[in-house]
Image (tube, rainbow, N blue to C red):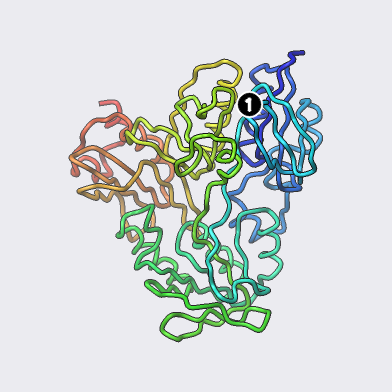
Amino acid sequence: MSEDCFVIVGAGHAGGRAAQALRAAGFDGRVVLVGEEAHVPYERPPLSKELIVTDAGLEKVRLHEADWYGEQKIELITGNPATALDPDTHTVTLADGATLPFTKCMLTTGARVRELPLKGADQDGVFYLRTMDDSEAIRSRLGEGVKVVVIGGGFIGLEMAGSACKLGCNVSVLEVADRLMGRSVAPEIGEWFAAMHRDRGVNLRLGVGIDHIEGDGKVSGVRLSDGETVAADIVVIGVGIIPNVELADAAGLTIDNGIVVDGQGRTSHPDIFSAGDVANQPNAFTGRRLRLESYQNAQDQAQAVARNMMGGDETYEDSLWVWSDQHDVNLQMTGVPDGWDELVWRGDVDSGSFMVFYLKAGHIVAVNTINNGREMRPAQRLMQSGKTFTAAELSDPEVKLLKLAKS
């Protein structure tokens, strides 16, 4: 057995996959995985979907059974978060006062919900959705006829709205912007999704301001800036997340919208690495740094960085792929749609199965598929090829994307 000790701070999806990758790559030293939550590592995407609409619990989303960690000689510490990181002494201090020495450390501290400073937000029935416990608490309040108000028209809010509708709830979505998913998709796609949600019974209110949450200790409604009240039995707030950089910042690591890492996941200290939602990483496709909040990045980056902790030199490049399931609609996205000069639509929009290419000077900078996920992989190949394409060839469903990718 090696005398090396690798400590992973953050026992979420990224941390769990990092520990798994170390053993899979043959690391035979000590591995310690430190988590704040009382649960074993689990996946977060189902929290707003399957776990809301079914009775499945932790067994549905955990990465491994609890016994697996012991079998792999991974020391899993739950419910006892790290409170200090000292790069000079190579130690991590836990909430209970224990100190862990490390040879190398990976920070997979993830992110926390962005809270709204609203009067009345501390009342019973007001929720944020980030953890297993959040999901279970919300699920216990839902049912036929329950009035649910969702604040936020991003992925989490819209997934929550779709799930609540499936349970027979009366759902309202309040969004301060004039369109849905404004940071992620083109306005035209946001308009399509707005119509889809309304068709499925959601009371969608765009461009509204929120004054406060009403109630007498238990929520009863949301007061809008114009004085109208939207009745509510529960309120779910989903307005983004904030990277958990405090531990790294106090340790003197470089911070800039997350923990700054190089292409191998190394921070400004050579023995400390980072991956997942908290890591600000270089991206060759965009030519700039990105902090990615996605399932795929949390998994793949953590695995690559784990191998680099062992001495590898693997440059991680994320595929920039994310997805969202809302009602019965699957939206998949790749690329970064923050600048384009043409949208190219492919397929029958009225059928509910189509795709959209975002072009800039003929180059594909992003792609959306709606209920058409089988086309995502060839679309990614086209985007990453760096070639230019015409609207005519991309929009024609008779022209196979795989053929374009090979041409």
Secondary element at tag 1? loop
Residue 231 position by quadrant: bottom right
Q: Which residue is mark 1?
A: 88
Which residue: 24% across, 42% down?
394
Query: In the rendered image, which quarter contains the C terminus?
Result: top left
Which residue: 76% across, 33% down?
99
Foreground residue, 345 or 12? 12
Residue 217 higher or lower than 95, as above or below: below
Three-letter amino acid code of the residue under disc 1: Asp
Q: Position of residue 169 (x, y in %)?
A: 59, 73
Which residue: 47% across, 27% down?
316
Does residue 95 show up?
yes
Q: Is residue 199 left or right of residue 120?
A: left
Q: Position of residue 25 (x, y in %)?
A: 64, 18
Q: Position of residue 273 (x, y in %)?
A: 56, 29
Which residue: 63% across, 26% down?
88
Q: Is residue 342 left or right of residue 206?
A: left
Residues packed near mark 1 inside 10 Å, few (<14), some (14 to 19) or many (20 plus) = few
